[in-house]
Structures are given as C-alpha cells and as structure tokens.
Amino acid sequence: MKLYRKILLCCFAATIAASTVQAQTQESSFEFLRLPVSAHSSSLGGHAISLAEPDLSLFIQNPALLSVVDNMTLGLNVMTWFSNTTIAGAQFCNIFDERSRYAFNARYVSYGKMPETAPDGTRTGTFRAKDMAVGATYSYMLTDNLSGGLTGNFICSRYGSMTSVAIGVDLGLFYSIPDQGITLAVAATNLGGQIKAFENTFQKLPFDLTASVSFRLSHAPLRFTVSMDNLTHWDKSDYYFTDDERSGFGEILKRHISAGIDFMLTDRFYIAAGLNLRNRAELAGEGSKGLTGITLGTGLRIGRAMFDLSYGKYQVSESSLICNFAFNL
C-alpha cells in the first residue's frame, strides 16, 4: 500500500479514536461550523454525506466526496439568516492525477454591527462580529469503489477587539456499490482545538461523527438517503427536552436521524425533500410544528454550470435559503 493511502487510513483511525475524548463535553466554540453549506445535502435533512454527485459543496461535510467532483470546478454559496447577517463561501477543486484531487474552500459569516455597552449598561459605541474559515482538502481513490479525504481548516472569529483562532481537521470515507445503487459514507468533522481563545477560556470545536447511506432504485428515478449524526453524543443532557417530554433512549435515538428522498427526473434535474427529526423535535413552536425540520430543494445542471437551492428552518424564528452555484472551468 502506498504511503499516502496509509496516511489517510491512519488519520481516519486516529480521528475515530480521539472522538471519545472530544465528546466528553458539549461546550464548544466556532458554532458557525455547524451551518449547512451544501443546498443538496440540506434538502435531504442536512447530513447527507453519501451522495455520489459532482456537487462541489458536498466535500465540506465529507472530504472523500471530492473524489467524484469534476476537475477545475469553482463554486460559490450563500445562505439567508438573521437580518444583517451575511453568510457566504467559495470552493475550488482540481486533480493531481486520475485518482487524487485537491481543493480549497473559504467560509465567512458576518453578523453586522452590534451595540457595545459597559458593564453598567452604558452604551459606548458599536462593534462588528464575524467568523471565518479557510481550508485545503486532499482526496484519494483507495480502491475503485473506496475513497478517502482529509481537510485542514484554519478558523478565526473576531468579535470587536477580541480574536479567537483554531485549527480543525475533517476526515471522511466514501464507498460505492454501483451494481446495487448503494453508496455509504462516514465522516468526522471539526476535530481540533483553539490556539488562541477569548479571554483564555479554551473550548473544543463542534466535533461531529456522521454516517450516511444512499440507495437508488434501479427502475425508478428515486434515491433514498438516511443519515445519523452526533454519533458520540448519547446523553440526555446533550439534547433539549421540555419538562413534560419523554427523554428515553428512543427519543435520544430520534435526535440522531435525518432522511431524504431525491426525485431524479433527469440526469441534470432533481427535486428533493428531507426531514431532520432533531430539528423538528427541538425547534418547533409550542402547539404547532408546521414545516419545522422539513427541508425542500432542487438542482439543475446546464452545460458546465450547476445550480442548487434549498429551503429549511434551522432556527426557531425564521426560515433560511441556501443557494449553490458551481461552474466547470
């Protein structure tokens, strides 16, 4: 086995082993890293990391998916959020050779101007708050059906005059069974820590271990995807429960699951719908769940250009749209 294959496999094994340490606390910094980037994954419940699609934004959640992206592709993404908040990102990928690819990505969140006050409540002016992350990714086809990927991220938050800096690592595996229409994936994201913290209070990154499986029917234009995230968090305290809500193992298990379906009407056009059971349980308003936890999306490929759009409620008060655009140069 060649050296770089060994490096990928050893790094992934080390990440899984270290995840038990990372999961000992839910206190984490840089929560913006949890925000969705891929419209397609978001439309399938938010954690669909097993999609064999030439969608450049998918490798943010699973670096191994870079192996199925076209070379020389540039991508852009934007997301609507709270008023005065700007969320955007960019990606670029290319090939080293027929089995390996590399990519770069950047994410940016600006929360706009906020009032600055003294401890006694006196307003002293305004300040700006923003989060940023830049990363480099490498993926390699370990076998004809198995690929691995590794991303290194430099992460920075600046709130007024305070700055926090961290280094993060994402790792992923992707396996396909083409004759059965099945693809499987596992990814460990946001493993790492701060090298500079606000007021020297150091916290973990928002680590997540996710597994996903997709199955495409052979005689119908349908693909089903089921995912489980937060696989290192199984305590009641890891999730939100109301005082009168049951909190047994079944309810905790439900908060790990998301699922979705693609209606692949042509090779260049799809419609998708998904359900995130945790969002539906924890973000719904009292007495009415409505569309909370339900996501919808669509995508179109025209020539060398690709467009993806999704709708969902990722926090209790407002809905959000995610738009991806990619172009094969």
Image (cartoon, rainbow, N blue to C red):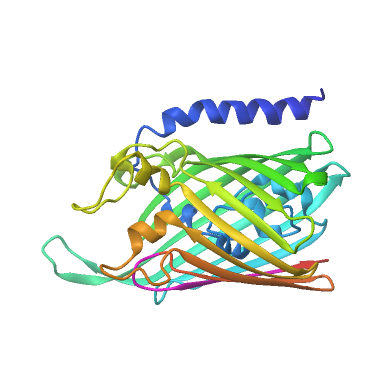
Q: Is residue 279 visible?
A: yes
**Image: magenta residue range:** 315-325
Side of 32 relative to 16 (left or right): left
Quarter of the figure with the C terminus: bottom right
Asked whether 317 falls inside the magenta stretch, the response is yes
Residue 111 in the image: state x and y as whole percent.
Answer: 40, 68
Looking at the rendering, in which quadrant would you find the N terminus? Answer: top right
Vertical side of 283 occupied by 194: above or below: above
Residue visible at 60% across and 57% down in the picture: 106
**In the image: residue 44, left or right of residue 31:** right
Q: Between 146 and 226, which is closer to the camera in this rendering? A: 226
Q: Along the horizontal axis of the image, is 124 left or right of 85?
A: left
Residue lying at 39% horizontally and 47% vertically, measured from the top left: 29
Residue 197 shows up from this direction: no
**Looking at this view, is 48 or 154 the one in front?**
48
Report x, y in % for residue 241.
26, 51
Q: Residue at x 58, y 50 (%)?
A: 226
Residue 119 in magenta stretch = no
- 167 lies above or below 54: above
View extreme (right): residue: 98
